[in-house]
Image (cartoon, rainbow, N blue to C red):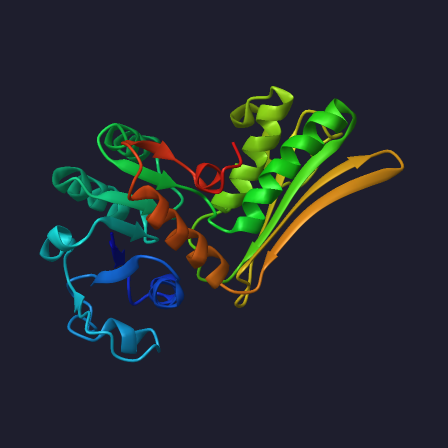
Amino acid sequence: MTTRVGITGAAGRMGKTLIEAIALAAGDLTLAAAIERPESSLVGADSGELAGQGRNGVPVVGALEEVIADIDVLIDFTVPDATTANVQTCVEHGVAIVIGTTGFTAPQQAVLDAAAAQIPMCKASNFSTGVNLCFKLLDMAARVLGDDVDIEVYEAHHRHKIDAPSGTALSMGQVVADALGRDLDKVAVYGREGQTGARDRETIGFATVRAGDIVGDHTVTFAADGERVEITHKASSRMSFARGAVRAAGWLKSADAGLYDMQDVLGLK
């Protein structure tokens, strides 16, 4: 049975890539809806032409409510306020949702958690297969190296990214903290300046770069006296994220209500 997919933020960089990924995907998925802000000048445009794929007959609409009855799964890589509202609409209509948005506040996350009790939801800071493999490697490295190393997380993204550190960097830090039995909220250090004193061994540091058109670079360094281990992932195209999100949409169609992530989709748990 065909899974009907809706893309919100369809005119954005990620939205266009998602439209392309669905067009290229093998299997029973089809683009059924493309949504943008109601004030967008692109409302009414053909979404296929917008994504550089040629006409596909799916026009861009200005509200999710206009097309919610036509989709089985919504893919949302927008901003926290919009995603939170879209989640509530999906709950009202029993539609599953794939969420790639990051930077949620605690109250917004609470809304998502409550919604996941009613609909299937796949939420991940990064849908790349490679990044999710890195999560497994980070857990292994942290458990083997233990408290004998200093741990730093570096990430770099394009100038337009609005949250920092990236959701992926925070997820990497969380994986490491969990493996070591640490509370990330207590041990995370976000940038350093001035006379900071000697480094606390339990600290997990984060460094952020925003520049140019960098799609996404992440490195976690485990540094001991005399050696260091670095686990790195570099994305050269948003298509790596889009393929994963589309894969998650197909997987989510047959899932029960609940909160899932890409590790579930890939069978890595």
Q: In the image shown, does 126 or 257 lie closer to the viewer? A: 257
Which quadrant would residue 8 be assigned to in this image?
bottom left
Which quadrant would residue 111 be assigned to in this image?
top left
Q: Position of residue 77 (x, y in %)?
A: 35, 53
Q: In the image shown, does 80 or 64 lie closer to the viewer? A: 64
Q: Position of residue 122 (x, y in %)?
A: 36, 40
Q: In the image shown, does 76 or 1 lie closer to the viewer? A: 1
Left or right of residue 1, residue 204 in this image: right
Q: Position of residue 52 (x, y in %)?
A: 35, 78
Image point (24%, 35%), residue name: 119
Left or right of residue 43, residue 22 in this image: right
Q: Position of residue 95 (x, y in %)?
A: 20, 43
Image point (67%, 49%), residue name: 232
Q: In the image shown, does 266 or 216 lie closer to the viewer? A: 266
Q: Is residue 67 visible?
A: yes
Q: Is residue 187 visible?
A: no
Q: Is residue 128 placed above or below 53 in the rendered structure? A: above
Left or right of residue 27, residue 226 in this image: right
